[in-house]
Image (cartoon, rainbow, N blue to C red):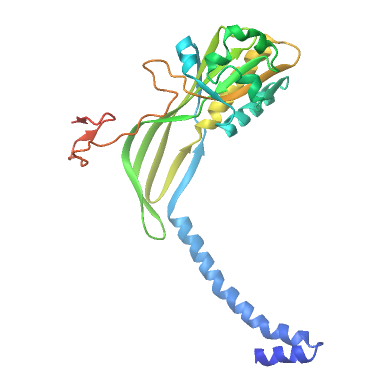
Amino acid sequence: MCEHAVQQVKQAPGSEGTAARCTRPANVQRRWLSAPLAALLVLFMGMSGCVPVPYRPAATLTHTPVGGDTAASIEVSPGTARAMVESLGASIHEAEPRIFVETHPLAETVFSHGTTLAQILEPAHAADMAARAADYLLTVGPTVHHQLHDTGAAAPFLFFPVIWVGYEKIQSVDTLCASFADLHEPHSVDGILVSSPYTEVIAAMVYGVGTIAMPEVSMRQVLAADVAHRLAAAHPTGEIRLTILAQEGGDEPGHDVCRPEPLKKPLAADTGVRGGDTLTGTGVRSP
């Protein structure tokens, strides 16, 4: 019947209403079939799985002078961690509009004497630093994640709908290392350590809830507020020029907070773990 109506439309241009009446029952039928399927899918998704609950943990900031050996181990680069550098610059300018941030300086004006922080801030090149289009230099490292404890276990069953079962509590700490220097007095460099400890928990029995920490937001805000307050206090009036670059390294001897923790590998001779035994980061078994 529908094919016959379509032929009539092609032969008689003024018969559009016949085709519309013919195709309408098919469209209505498809809607009636798809509606229950969509409702069933929403029901399965609503009654199974795990609901994520994001939150921002608190962050703290400490200051430590950077020694000569540490400054020599810090590699400065304009290309790495670009997103972090730009977002931090925007946060600093928002906290204090008088601070104008430069995140894309000319390489010859910054790295003419080397790429380490010690080489960039070498007092012998004070004349070159005074000619730069910035008053202060802030170098920021990547966010480093350290897992402290993992208690319990929770996992999804691999079928649809997804069913989560278990309880797991993961305690971690994220750190971020930065270095701050006055380009007119480069003999002293201030090391900044931002840390954010947090706990993520998932509890589920068919249907569950899991917390998701966002420490990078809190860490960026704390660092931006600290730098903006310091510069505003040092210069009550006038424009302030700040250059922000990325850094790698910055750990003092005996500390490991600026670099990622080493991967934990099992012993080469025995990759299995006996009941009640665990593997430490050095590959030594502990009861």
Front position in the image: 91 or 187:
187
Q: Is residue 22 left or right of residue 55?
A: right
The residue nearer to you, when weighing 7 against 198, is: 7
In the image, residue 158 sits, relative to residue 65, either above or below, namely below
| Side of 46 where 287 appears, left or right | left
Q: Position of residue 216 (x, y in %)?
A: 52, 31
Q: Nearer the viewer, residue 62 or 10?
A: 10
Q: Give residue 97's quadrant in the image.
A: top right
Question: What is the quadrant of the N terminus in the image?
Answer: bottom right
Q: Position of residue 235 (x, y in %)?
A: 70, 10
- Nearest the eye: 119 or 196: 119
Residue 67 visible in the snapshot = no
Q: Position of residue 111 (x, y in %)?
A: 60, 20
135 sits to left or right of 30: right
Residue 170: x, y in percent? 37, 35
Q: In percent of the image, x 68 and y 10: which residue is there?
A: 130
Q: Residue at horizontal 59%, vertical 13%? A: 181
In the figure, 124 relative to 52: above or below? above
